[in-house]
Amino acid sequence: MRRYPTGRGVPEDSPVQPPPQAPRLCGCRVPQCPVAFRCLTGPAHWHEHFPIANGERQSPIDICRKSAKYDSSLKPLSFSYDASTARNIVNNGHSFNVEFDDSSDKSVVQGGALDGVYRLVQFHIHWGSCDGQGSEHTVDGVKYDAELHIVHWNVKYGKFAEAVKHPDGLAVVGIFMKVGNAKPEMQKVVDALSSIQTKGKQASFTNFDPTGLLPACRDYWTYPGSLTTPPLLECVIWHVLKEPITVSPEQMCKLRGLCFNAENEPVCHMVDNWRPCQPLKSREVRASFQ
């Protein structure tokens, strides 16, 4: 399975693959490069290899509170996760993934703007090189320090590789993160990062229920969008939670201590692995709250 920056894998046999000449996100390999995600092969250039980067429903977006339309028909999000489905934690060279067994409906999300059941496949985080930047979505133009993405796929399509071909194929729940008090439930994730410091490293990561990473308030904004990294497929129904979670400065520092590079390459710290906001175009953002 080929992995992309946010960790959303596309199996090798999937018809949706990047062109052979598509570059890595950062090929500079300059030691301690401060802009690894923003080099000549970064987000501003993705359209050269993935024309859909300029598509009609790209993500992330800026969420304007005043423009978001309250929709009373939206249901509460219902999370049902089984800790036994957690499998591995992986450094894919662009973020880390915590991966889950998605062969059954043991860990799923329902409700919200979704029709049907979506299976949990992985979660990952985007973060900045300093506080005040790092989230992909923004609210009234304001960024958070990081953003957690919990990724699920629509079971009606049978497998992930098929789901990404459809506009309702994936359901991604976005959770803003800010530096403040420690998040105890995040500590197990943070502690595991030392074993996957460099690209390609993988470790067992079991008995973990990501429900503990959710905020107490589950109010959300929802809109149709895309993956935020190549291949940028427009297959995502986004639910961005209104309430952020907090992590301690020490926990955030552990994230920034990961590396884009493989073990035998010059050190290039993994920071600013986020895509800038994209035009909303004709889409409507709906809110589950007034």
Image: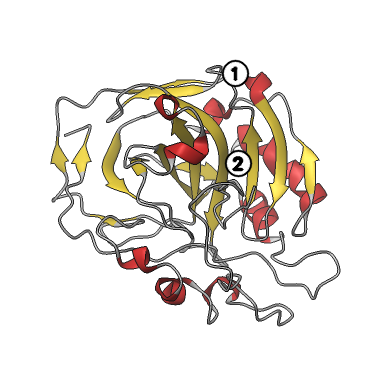
**Residue 234: horizontal and vertical position, in percent?**
35, 51
> Residue at position x 71%, y 72% from top?
268
Name which of mark 1 and mark 2 comes first in the sequence: 1
Which of the 4 quarters of the picture holds residue 241?
A: top left
Say if mark 1 contacts mark 2, CB within 8 Å: no
Q: Which residue is mark 1?
A: 82
Q: Which residue is mark 2?
A: 182
- The front one of 50 and 106 is 50
Q: Residue 231's mark?
A: none
> Residue at position x 57%, y 56% from top?
4
Which of the 4 quarters of the picture holds residue 166?
A: top left
Q: Residues within 10 Å of mark 1 (few under 14, many from 20)?
A: some
* Distance Cα–Cα, label 1 vs label 2: 24 Å
- For the C terminus, the image quarter is top left
How is colour applied across the structure in the image?
secondary structure
Q: Is residue 290 left or right of residue 5?
A: left
At label 2, which amino acid type do we have? Ala
Q: Residues within 10 Å of mark 2 (few under 14, many from 20)?
A: some
**Residue 172: horizontal and vertical position, in percent?**
42, 40
Q: Is residue 76 left or right of residue 171?
A: left
**Residue 186: horizontal and vertical position, in percent?**
63, 38
Which of the 4 quarters of the picture holds residue 260?
A: bottom right
Q: Is residue 68 left or right of residue 238?
A: left
Q: Is residue 34 visible?
A: yes
- The front one of 168 and 285 is 168
**Residue 196: horizontal and vertical position, in percent?**
78, 51
> Residue at position x 25%, y 23% from top?
75
Q: Is residue 241 visible?
A: no
Q: Mark 2 falls on what kind of element?
A: loop
At label 1, which amino acid type do we have? Asp
